[in-house]
Amino acid sequence: MSDAFWTEARAQMLLDPEVTNLNTGSFGPLPRVVFDRATELRRRLAEEPMDFFVRRVPPLLWSAREQLAGFLGGDPRRLVFAANVTASINIVAAALRLAEPGEILLTDHEYGAMRWCWERAAQRQGLSLRTFALPILPRTPGEIVDAARAAFTDRTRLFFFSHILSPTGLVLPARELCAEARQRGILTVIDGAHAPAMIPLDLTSLGCDFYGGNGHKWLLAPSGAGFLYFGNGSEERVQPLQVSWGWHHDRRRADERDDFGSTPRLRAFEFEGSRDICPWLTVPTAINFQEGLGWERIRTRVLGLTGYLRERLAGLPGLSLATPAEPALHGAMTAFRLPDNLDPIALRRGLWQQYHIEAPIVERSEAFVGRSVAGLPPQAFPWRYLIRVSTWWYNTEQEIERLTAALTVLLPECRTE
């Protein structure tokens, strides 16, 4: 695909021209058409709230649900809209009742807030929380499956893992992991924060019990567009965190489409009194925008940018890859290990203040490492600092060159000894 095509596509994005944004992994910028759609919806909400919620929302909400479910390879009657993946996972963690004694099992690379979520769930139910070490730079998905299989015990009641790891961008073989857990009667809950749009999804065949995801990253939808998906047979296991309108309904018709743009079951989860649901209604516009560019084109473009990034940064002194090169194990986020004798605050400040580059420095303090991997040998974490670089289709080789030049200057300056 020609540079002219991607230059024109990039021009349709709302991007600060003074900033090199290499952090779609935290927040995706909005296409102009998505911003305009959200603004249009919010204007109508501001002008005439009753008409908006009562007459306009129901068909728009059902259409958004159908389109998102279709994009994710799922059933719209199993898809609950939520603010984000944190809200989704908290619904599950707060509502599930697990047999005790037992344990909740996590990988050693889970997002800190999600680990605390399960820590609280374990404490409330008298369960233990255990982590196991993922292979460092695995060469095949099978190495990850083997590590999980070895970690399962008769005490394991639930297995929680990220489809794509936030620190390193490693893509886990979710279908195979769920199959191994299901054979042992272990529930699976997946943090899919980074998966929607970055990689193809087919939730129906994934085999998990619960899947939470975000739309505000790679899907380029507004903040507030998240979801929770129920696997087959799991919808009866949980209840909403809040009771509002929608709580009392005919259980025999719980999964039939209703007059509110949902089903009685889904409405019980989604209706939390007055709230702005415009981000949910904007999801179809976000999907249509990138579909218009072509998903195969996007993934080819991202593959090229990721390869170029690896080539440029891997050659810098003190940097080494922390994300596997195997195509099945990586997507649009690439992490590089930074030297241990580094001041991460100075590097973070320098990237932003001197170069206006958005690229997170992932830091594992000794206290956090000790807390999150209790019981694991020291070699479980061979790194302390990472830089994680997102390369989505709107990024350019010139932006990668800016990052390369910035790190060439900043890394020596930010050494602590």
Image: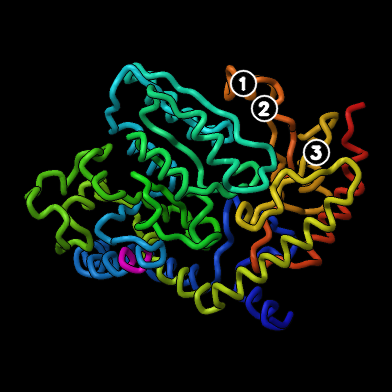
**Pointer 2: what residue?**
380
Q: Nearer the viewer, residue 387 or 58?
A: 387
Q: Nearer the viewer, residue 271 or 341?
A: 341
Q: Nearer the viewer, residue 23 or 212?
A: 212
> Mark 2 is on which residue type?
Ala
Q: Is residue 121 above or below residue 251?
A: above
**Pointer 3: what residue?**
338
Q: Is residue 60 above or below residue 191?
A: below
Magenta segment includes 67:
yes
Q: Position of residue 8 (x, y in %)?
A: 66, 80
Magenta segment includes 247:
no
Q: Nearer the viewer, mark 3 or mark 2?
A: 2
Looking at the rendering, the stretch of residues picked out in magenta corresponds to: 64-68
Q: Residue at x 35, y 49 (%)?
A: 228
Q: Residues within 10 Å of mark 3 (few under 14, many from 20)?
A: many
| 1 and 3 marks in contact (CB < 8 Å) | no
Q: Earlier in the sequence, mark 3 or mark 2?
A: 3
- Asked whether residue 290 appears in the rendered view, the answer is yes
**Pointer 1: what residue?**
376
Q: Residues within 10 Å of mark 2 (few under 14, many from 20)?
A: some
Q: Position of residue 116 (x, y in %)?
A: 48, 28
Q: Nearer the viewer, mark 1 or mark 3?
A: 1
Q: Residue at x 28, y 33 (%)?
A: 95
Q: Position of residue 88 (x, y in %)?
A: 38, 44
Q: Earlier in the sequence, mark 1 or mark 3?
A: 3
Q: Residue at x 79, y 47 (%)?
A: 351
